Image (cartoon, coloured by chain):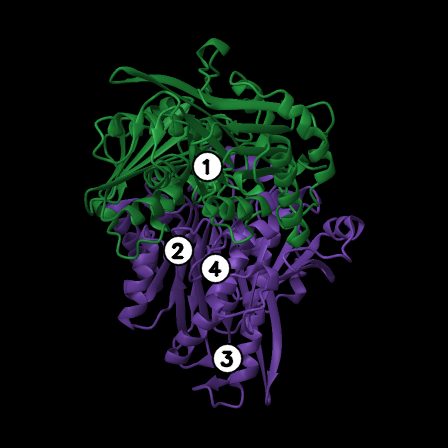
Chain colours: A purple, B green
Amino acid sequence: MAVNLHIPSQSDIHPVAGIEIGTAQAGIRKAGRKDLTVFRLAEGTSVAGVFTTNRFRAAPVQVCERHLAAGQGIRALVVNTGNANAGTGEPGMLAARQTCDALATLLGIRPEQVLPFSTGVILEPLPVDRITAALPAAVGDLQPGNWFDAAYGIMTTDTQPKIASQRITLGEHTVTITGISKGAGMIRPNMATMLGFLATDAGIAPGLLETLTREIAGRSFNRITVDGDTSTNDSFIIMASGASGVHVQNRDDPHFATLAQALGEAALELAQKIVRDAEGATKFITVQVDEAASSQEALKVAYAIAHSPLVKTAFYASDPNLGRILCAVGYAGIADLDVSGMRMWLGDTLVASNGGRDPGYTEEDGQRIMKESEITVRIALGRGSVSETVYTCDFSHEYVSINADYRS
Amino acid sequence: MAVNLHIPSQSDIHPVAGIEIGTAQAGIRKAGRKDLTVFRLAEGTSVAGVFTTNRFRAAPVQVCERHLAAGQGIRALVVNTGNANAGTGEPGMLAARQTCDALATLLGIRPEQVLPFSTGVILEPLPVDRITAALPAAVGDLQPGNWFDAAYGIMTTDTQPKIASQRITLGEHTVTITGISKGAGMIRPNMATMLGFLATDAGIAPGLLETLTREIAGRSFNRITVDGDTSTNDSFIIMASGASGVHVQNRDDPHFATLAQALGEAALELAQKIVRDAEGATKFITVQVDEAASSQEALKVAYAIAHSPLVKTAFYASDPNLGRILCAVGYAGIADLDVSGMRMWLGDTLVASNGGRDPGYTEEDGQRIMKESEITVRIALGRGSVSETVYTCDFSHEYVSINADYRS
């Protein structure tokens, strides 16, 4: 079902020097699939992360935040699918710590140097014994070329692996950026997405990486929504090993802008791939709001449109029932919005102006555009000069089927 | 598909002295159905209304507000279905005024004494000629016993008419309360619902009626949601003719409390009937949030649960995937929520406590309750003593079908 989701060939996935990956079958929820992934990071790799704002933060998210704050130097990540270890109280915290302990022992590092991640069903105990039993196999599998296995290894209801990889030249050095993400439902990240891991062999000073990770999340994973549900486990991590020989210390570094842009593009590609593979999605929708007085009000309008079940089912049906979009703009929460100053475009076609249907708009134009698989809705609010863009998908029978069946 | 929606028999619908109703076929969108309804109100009837907060307020909503503010004494209502006359700019305002002019001429009253209402598709011109052509037939049909015809006459995607009627005794007088409502999708009223009309032959002083209408809307139509979409046309009206001989001037009147409670019950019944007949609904869900620090935070939590597509599809599947509810509580926007102090019940069964699954909860209990057609989710936040209750429904394949097909 995925909408124009490009899966690169194995030869286009560039390993990142300083980062090794191993996967294993732990049988956490279902047998016979790789559901456990380990990353080993070279000494000196700087790591930063942003995490969900959901108050039911999963146990692994809480452990990640503590271990990042401990400043011991992160040397490994461990990711399980099949169980979110969220809504699991103190036993869940213990299970996350046991996972870190076991991996630390195997790798000869300290538990505070391990970041744990979980994704899957909420409110069920994590079968930590199965994870610790499978960790030796995952560690035995560690090698730089395993990115594809990892992209498969972290999937839940995803139908496709999500992976982005590119090489850029910085002065005399070639720098690699490769990352993976997962997520298809419970997607309206608010700090980061379900799981996103981005690695580079450029070195980035820890404080700078932390700020940069927030900025990049704000323009990528924090601008997508499938169903408006902010998950308990959202985590987005950037790892910078420095193995390429490039080291960026601050924003004045001549390589900073190019590197930051390339990392941002990779994050946006991974975030958009989550929308392209969203549960039941048949269309990829870009909602762009221009001429807002503030970023906050632009986002209010964009999310009101992107979350409206009526708008999303109209896209699914390829029905230019565009009054539903107008309605969503109206209830987005801008109390003093003057609707007569607003304009709306579908693709390049002006649909609404002066508080009503534009005289030049024809139903035929609307129908033609609604049949496409990639559609842009653009709203100009006529209130200022701020723009924001949000990415979402349509709402289909398949979404209901997937979410009525999941877990059963 | 409606969930336990009681349709009273004709003999249980009590006409309201001072209120006459007539319907007609205007062919506004489809031929062969009654799509035009007129109410004539006896002189001296006090009328109050609350309307949508959507910034794309439909033309008839804007005209209603002006005519109520004009204080000329409202003598008639005119309701069309098939077209919302919203997102129609200045031509839409003209069409609403033409409708009022035509009815005023027929009834020998002033246009400012008419309130117009429209419901149906947004962003399409209102065929006002068809309405004015059919008005004489509706006026010719005026009589007190036509409430059922009106309940059918205002339907759009509704599958059932929504009507509530009761008689109460106030001292030596018998007072009648009868009302109708419509709506099945684009339902998350924010002042009132799509359309609700409640009439009594008690007299209520205009200022008091205005306050009372707001209070009643706040506990009934403003506490339901189907899909989170606040319509452009939401309108809720209370008419008090005084023909019973009872006249309530202020809150100290001995009859005030009984009358206000009876009106509130009728409004809640009409509001709940909209949820019971919601597009595709198979279950009626009550979300009760207790122990909140404020009404605002209780409602944030209740609506986060009631709007989550993941929660709603789990109800549809009768799957006790209750981690989704916990997740919604977590992202509801209470920044300092301590999840360890929260408890969650499904029906009478305690599901979650201390930040995780309660030790006494069993999957069997969850499955048993999820199979029922009326389910209560109760959350105790452990932060205060404020409670709020919101009514909603599940999210089914049928919802997608209805909204992917509507208009086509």
Residue at image location 55% in from the left, 46% down from the top? B63
> Is the residue under label 3 in contact with that under label 1 (CB below 8 Å)?
no
Q: Are marks 1 and 3 on the same chain?
A: no
Which residue carries the number 2 mark? A117
Q: Which of pointers 1 and 3 indicates the residue nearer the eye?
A: 1
- In the image, B368 versus B244, the foreground residue is B244
- Judged from the image, the secondary structure of the residue bearing numbered disc 2 is strand
- Judged from the image, the secondary structure of the residue bearing numbered disc 1 is strand
Q: Tell me the kind of residue under disc 3.
A: Ala
Q: Tell me the kind of residue under disc 1.
A: Phe
Q: Tell me the kind of residue under disc 2.
A: Phe
Location of residue A333 in the rendering, given as x and y in whole percent from the top left corner: 46, 56
Q: Tell me the kind of residue under disc 4.
A: Ile
Q: Is residue A64 left or right of residue B48?
A: left
- The chain that hosts pointer 3 is A
Q: Which mark is residue A334?
A: 4
Which circle's residue, 4 or 3, is located before the other in the chain?
3
Distance from the alpha carbon under mark 1 to that under mark 3: 62 Å
Location of residue B330 in the rendering, given as x and y in whole percent from the top left corner: 34, 49
Which residue carries the number 1 mark? B236
Q: Is residue A66 left or right of residue A400?
A: left
User: From the viewer's perspective, is residue A304 above or below residue B345?
Assistant: below
Distance from the alpha carbon under mark 1 to that under mark 2: 50 Å
Q: Is residue B264 left or right of residue A41?
A: left
Distance from the alpha carbon under mark 3 to that under mark 2: 24 Å
Which circle's residue, 3 or 2, is located before the other in the chain?
2
Q: Which of pointers 1 and 2 indicates the residue nearer the eye?
A: 1
Count residues near mark 3 (Cα–Cα under 10 Å), then give few for <14, some for 14-19, many for 20+. Answer: many
- The chain that hosts pointer 4 is A
- In the image, B237 versus A328, the foreground residue is B237
Question: From this viewpoint, is residue B339 visible?
Answer: yes
Distance from the alpha carbon under mark 4 to that under mark 3: 43 Å
